[in-house]
Amino acid sequence: QAVLTQPSSLSASPGASASLTCTLRSGINVGAYRIYWYQQKPGNPPQYLLRYTSDSDKHQGSGVPSRFSGSKDASANAGILLISGLQSEDEADYYCMIWHSSASVFGGGTKLTVL
Amino acid sequence: EVQLVESGGGLVQPGGSLRLSCAASGFTLSNYAMNWVRQAPGKGLEWVSTISEGGTTYYADSVRGRFTISRDTSRNTLYLQINSLRGEDTAIYYCAQFGPSILGNWGQGTLVTVSS
């Protein structure tokens, strides 16, 4: 089982909100981790969006709009990237990442379609 | 302005070697953890290696023993020496800053193609 699991795709309408999940493997407690989120558009390098550990320990990337926010769902053992007020420019691949066992681990990515 | 610029990629035969460079500007590289991340064509992101602020190095299992991360503080440059290259090493290699202290910047990447 992968350390981080992301749904391969998600679709949402302009103006709506999208919740992208990053589920940690059983036995790895989401509460203990800083979760990084990245956005990647075709032909471009990934762009750092934010890092979320808790409401008192979070970091927003430089220039990243506040409609991108992070949270955790302890019951689901998952990190969440919430994008509100979806815009066509938000269509991209989104990756989560954690530092686990002396290694960085990326999720497989979610392709977000805005239509 | 913080900037990361990679160089050194190219076409190399299986078993060959390359040294990738990442020139940093706008910040002192040795004050931050620095990373190499790669992306094979059409695939997701794969972490390769990290060097911490203190100089401790970490490697993915897939590259340990073949790749070496280092930095030159006088040149403010990060390196990745890659040896014994295999076809599965074909990817865009990104230099990226992330870690306990975070700026979040990534370079544009340098393409490594392993083929005979």
Image (spheres, rainbow, N blue to C red):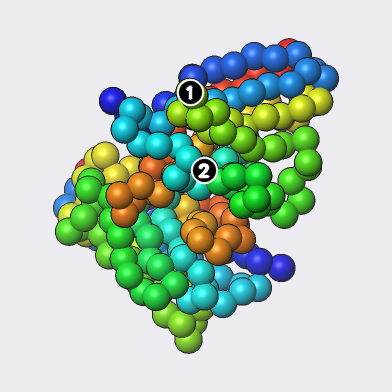
**Quadrant, the N terminus of chain B:** bottom right
Q: Quadrant of the rendered structure where residue A115 is?
A: top right
In percent of width and height, residue B56 lies at 33, 70
**Residue sitting nearer the eye, A79 or B115:** A79
Is A45 left, or right, of B111 in this rendering?
A: right
Mark 1 — on which chain does it sit?
A
Mark 2 — on which chain does it sit?
A
Using a 10 Å C-alpha cutoff, classify the residue at mark 2 as few (fewer than 14 neighbours), some (14 to 19) or many (20 or more). many
- Going from the N terminus, do you reach mark 1 or mark 2 first? 2
In percent of width and height, residue A114 lies at 71, 18
In percent of width and height, residue A59 lies at 65, 52
Which label belongs to residue B52?
A: none
Q: Which residue is mark 1?
A: A76
In percent of width and height, residue A85 lies at 81, 25
The span from disc 1 to disc 2 (Cα, nearest Å) is 15 Å
Q: Is residue B6 visible?
A: no
**Residue sitting nearer the eye, A22 or B103:** A22
Q: Which residue is mark 2?
A: A35
